[in-house]
Amino acid sequence: MITIRYFASLREKLGEHDTVALHELAHPTVGGVRLALMARSPLHAESLVLTAGIRSSCNHELCDDSQPVAEGAEVAFFPPVTGG
């Protein structure tokens, strides 16, 4: 299972966290996680759209959509501007 965390305005829209099973992913990457989440609902699709400037991290390190993910990974999504 891959743990998903949402921050700032994404947390307000989608909740604090989610999970995705590795076998649900067409591609075992952060981008694959994003696409699997976007397929869950129109709200997910609107919130995580690729053109929104959403940033991502995998296991607490900033990354892009090509970052591979493995079982037990933690992927986080956050908007380009977050409060401190």
Image (cartoon, rainbow, N blue to C red):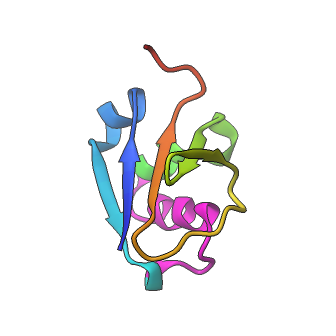
In the picture, measured across the screen, residue 63 lies left or right of residue 18, that is right
- Image quadrant occupied by the C terminus: top left
Question: Is 28 covered by the magenta stretch?
Answer: yes
Residue 62, relative to residue 83: is it above or below? below
Residue with the most extreme front position: 60
Name the quadrant containing residue 65.
bottom right
Residue 54, relative to residue 74: is it above or below? above
Range of residues picked out in magenta: 24-42
In the picture, measured across the screen, residue 63 lies left or right of residue 76, that is right
Name the quadrant containing residue 69.
bottom right
Q: Residue at x 60, y 27 (%)?
A: 80
Residue 50, relative to residue 18: is it above or below? above
- Image quadrant occupied by the N terminus: bottom left
Query: Where does the image place residue 28, in percent across and percent down from the top left?
Result: 59, 76
In the picture, measured across the screen, residue 58 lies left or right of residue 15, that is right
| Closest to the observer, 39 or 73 | 73
